[in-house]
Image: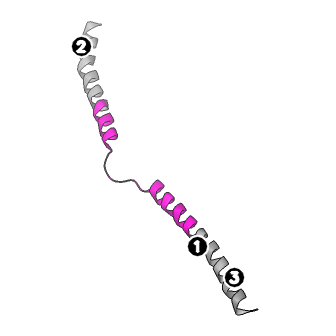
Amino acid sequence: MDRADVGGLRGGLGGGLFHAGVGLLVLLVIQVLNVYKPPGLTPYGWRKQQEERRQQREQRTVSPAEDAAT
């Protein structure tokens, strides 16, 4: 095997390893983003939580009046 052949083989193999490594890195980043949950609520989650609490308060204040009417 000639020195030029070894250099060509190394260059061809390196490109394949590079792409495989980058692909693996991309998959690892995707996996971390799927597992990681930042602390706290998003604005949407906070708003929905406030709406649920408001509805619960309204139901508690309306329920005794409904019971007295029946």
Q: Main secondary structure of the magenta part?
A: helix
Percent of width and height locating residue 20: 61, 69
Percent of width and height locating residue 25: 52, 66
Position of 41 relative to 53 (above/below)? below
| Contact flag, marks 3 and 2 (Cβ < 8 Å) | no
Q: Is 45 contained in the magenta span?
A: yes
Q: Residue at x 57, y 70 (%)?
A: 21
Region in magenta: 22-51
For label 3, the residue is 9
Position of 58 relative to 17 (above/below)? above
As helix, strand or loop, the secondary structure at mark 1 comes to helix
Task: Kindly identify the amino acid type of the residue bearing the numbered disc 2.
Answer: Ala
Labelled disc at residue 65 = 2
Q: Disc count in the image?
A: 3
Work out whether mark 2 precedes mark 1 in sequence or the reverse, and give the earlier one.
1
Percent of width and height locating residue 42: 33, 44
Apparent side of residue 4 relative to residue 67 in the rendered image (left or right): right
